[in-house]
Amino acid sequence: MEMKAVEGGITAPKGFKAAGVSCGIKAGTKKDLALVCSEVPAKAAAVFTTNKMVAPPILLSRKNVSDGIAQAVLINSGNANACTGERGLSDARKMSELAAEALDVPSENVLVASTGVIGVPLPMEKVERGIKEAKVALDVGGHLEAAEAIMTTDTFPKEFAVEFELGGKIVTLGGMAKGSGMIAPNMATMLGFLSTDLVICRTCLKACLVEAVNKSFNMITVDGETSTNDMVVIMANGLAGNEKLVLGEDDLPVFQKALDLVTQKLAKTIVKDGEGITKFLEITIAGAKTFGDAKAAAMAVANSNLVKTAFFGEDANWGRIIAAIGHSGAECDPWKVSIHFNGKKIVENGMVASFDEDDVLGILKGEEIEVLIELGVGRERATVWTCDLSYDYVRINAAYRT
Amino acid sequence: MEMKAVEGGITAPKGFKAAGVSCGIKAGTKKDLALVCSEVPAKAAAVFTTNKMVAPPILLSRKNVSDGIAQAVLINSGNANACTGERGLSDARKMSELAAEALDVPSENVLVASTGVIGVPLPMEKVERGIKEAKVALDVGGHLEAAEAIMTTDTFPKEFAVEFELGGKIVTLGGMAKGSGMIAPNMATMLGFLSTDLVICRTCLKACLVEAVNKSFNMITVDGETSTNDMVVIMANGLAGNEKLVLGEDDLPVFQKALDLVTQKLAKTIVKDGEGITKFLEITIAGAKTFGDAKAAAMAVANSNLVKTAFFGEDANWGRIIAAIGHSGAECDPWKVSIHFNGKKIVENGMVASFDEDDVLGILKGEEIEVLIELGVGRERATVWTCDLSYDYVRINAAYRT
């Protein structure tokens, strides 16, 4: 059986329910509190922000997931509960306790996440009412509401799920995520929640998650920024009834493939909803000396304001790509670089190639552009996904709080 | 005698002449070729871009300055002579030879610099005619024309000069520079030309230049970008007749102070002409564990698109400052950070301080803002200068070539 995309997002796997409600953290009636819960305790693994100014919910969730078990995740948007001092820590703890009480599970099995404005204490009375409401609303059909409730400047909810066969059993893997500024590598970027009914050991689950994140959420960037609050969590509740996956198992790559697919799909969707985006850019560096070089060069190109504004302006300003690579620290040689846009050669041996200007203009007018850069100094490659930099990015971020 | 600002820019010191002409590299009658020449061979030192994709003029000038002697600098704008292959190298060489011939000096004593579009060969016939014209125009009064001729997207010419006494003699130090995008640390940033009539040994001159650049041009950033072409050069022709300055001399700090003043003045002027700037920002990190940490954190704040757009929007979004520091890799503690805007405390112990919103709004409406961030984990500090990120930055860079 092939990998098959299915409906249902985070609640597609057996035994998961979700809800998204409006508790009043955000203005108006916008949803701002999501609850995801498994019927039974699940194996859990998580990856957290590398930002040193970690927010209280990260501190709490890091502790609660350390035993590899979780049963629920509570997420609020509109307020990051960051830079909120002792009160922030106690609010994060309170969130896990209130959800635990409502769901009748141990509070150490509840993870919490927050996203939004920094430095403002959470309105805990509203959160408390919201948790009760979310408990009542919990439903297999609640995945889309949950995906909506974790949005900040996102313009659409992001969810995806797949089904695959493993040892004669149907296994399902679902997920939801939010962006959409402060998207940059090293997991300091966004929120992602994954659920599966797979039976798997904790060690495998963590290893597979780390690998998937390194190939997906760590390979996207909107503006090179990272946040104080971000995390990716996976819960595996074992209800698919497959034989338990452990390290070295032949079936492990099947699960890894599914996890890669779902995380990459969510990661790219985050970029496609990048603040002010008009173009989705896939930047591949090939022929690098090391993978580290390839990734550094690809990220330097992807994060270059000059490159991003050139794509916004539909201008084949490849000189800025060359300058960004030279600035990245990656081993390179100005005489060996070649650059392709959607397979069309623009630069060869570090100099402009002969190409039809209209062909290239046609490519630049498109909404998705693949940029392939061959460094010609080795065999390693890396691909990152990013977007252009437009007037709207400035508009959105100049007036975020007001 | 105090340090005194004087008129005359690059030709303020004795024995220097300059010219700026239009030779047709740029459209219309815009000046695009500058020539600076000393009456006599001068001690010379230079610092070059750290970008690995170095352009041919850098390769040539690096070689020509390696003996510590130069007599002239030829600079064109409108074309970077970068990514131009063998032809680019031969064009750079040709530029030095043509200028040498016109000035009747050895070609290895002529440095060349280019700035502008990447990847297009230089129109050498125009350059050749321009060099002849510049030779004729060379004059003590030509400093402003020269400063104009090195501009790209700069909106005004940048020059500065000072006079000071050293061992009973009047010494003059002048300079000119160009920005105004791709301004970032590590000298991969811009062009700067300095002249002095000081008598000084080569080793001292190089050491003083490196120190000055590290405290000036390497401490500014507009967009975190670096270029393939940038350099800072100083020529010291010895016509002031002071006793020769050598290492360990008591008078060396006097010259260093003058050099710091001129380079910092030029560096800040570059930021003040940053593409699309509406606010000039001075970012100081204090209380860092190491100077490296202080500079990394200051640069992370200065290069953060989210911080820059917040200042553009006159929004006291200090959470983004905290997030940028946390992302910088510098040792820090979310419970110890404090932030001041123009001396007004905004954040204390990582949390919002009580302040008058109107006071802060008044500060944010100003054109120059001093941001002081105390990390509270050590004693080191660093200051960088940057600007905000506006719609105009996007507009300028989305349409640079077209």
Image (cartoon, coloured by chain):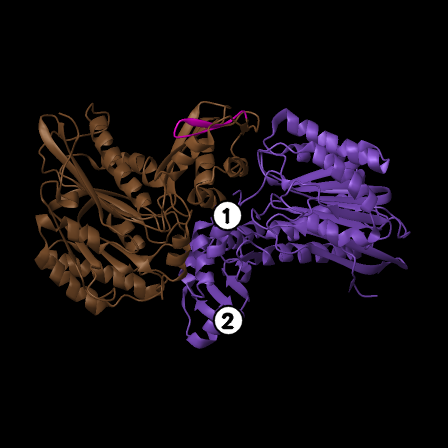
Chain colours: A purple, B brown
Task: Tell me the amino acid under the disc marked 1.
Answer: Asn
In front here: B25 or B106?
Answer: B25
In front here: A342 or B28?
Answer: B28
Tell me if residue A208 can be seen.
Answer: no
Residue named by callout 1 = A397
Give the secondary structure at mark 2. helix
Whole-percent x and y of residue B69?
19, 45
Does residue B131 lie above or below B162 as drawn? below
Q: CA gap, disc 1 to disc 2? A: 29 Å
Residue A271 numbered mark, or none:
none
Residue named by callout 2 = A363
Specify whether disc 1 shares its chain with disc 2.
yes
1 and 2 marks in contact (CB < 8 Å): no
Task: Tell me the amino acid under the disc marked 2.
Answer: Ile
Give the secondary structure at mark 1. helix
Residue A189 falls inside the magenta stretch:
no
Badge 2 sits on which subunit? A
Task: Please identify the quadrant where the N terminus of chain B is shown.
Answer: top left
